[in-house]
Image: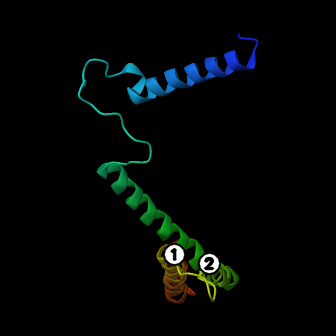
Amino acid sequence: MPTDKTGFDNARAGAHDRAIGRWENEGGAFTGLHEHRTPTVAGEIGDAEAGNLRVRLIALENLIVALLAGAPESQSELVREMAAYISPRPGATPHRLTIEAARNMLAIVERAAHYKTTSEGVDRWYP
């Protein structure tokens, strides 16, 4: 192990470069098989991964609706407060994604309210 700081930094940089090199060729799993293959860029996802994320997001939204439908009204009120909190402040530049997030939160609370009113007095767990 190098004793001076520069030697240590160089050894660390070399180890980093070797690790990245293994990552870019998937640990050597495709050595020689796909010479034309370009390295993937971190952050990019394919169509299958994007579809999987959409499905998981829909599942999470439905879980939140179900949980809010069975929760006390104070939980729904808390979500409404949070939606109002993330909405743009007076004088601030509105951001499209923030506005849409707040709108979606309120829509989820409304969906949950629908299930609260349709299932009141009905045992939801047993036929």
Could you say which disc has been placed on residue 14 in the image? none
Secondary structure at badge 2 equals helix
Image-based side of 16 in relation to 35, left or right: right
The residue drawn where x is 66% and y is 85% is 77
Q: Amino acid at mark 1?
A: Ala
Asked if the residues shown at circle 1 and circle 2 are in contact, with their CB atoms under 8 angstroms apart, the answer is yes
| Placement of 19 over or under 88, stated as above or below | above
Q: CA distance from mark 1 to mark 2?
A: 8 Å
Q: Which residue is mark 2?
A: 86
The residue drawn where x is 44% and y is 42% is 42
Q: Earlier in the sequence, mark 1 or mark 2?
A: 2
Callout 2 environment at 10 Å: few (<14), some (14 to 19), or many (20+)?
few
- Please state, as top left, top right, bottom left or bottom right, where the N terminus lies in the image: top right
Q: How is the image coloured?
A: rainbow
| Residue 60 placement (x, y as % from top left) | 49, 64
The residue drawn where x is 30% and y is 33% is 38
| Placement of 75 over or under 45, stated as above or below | below
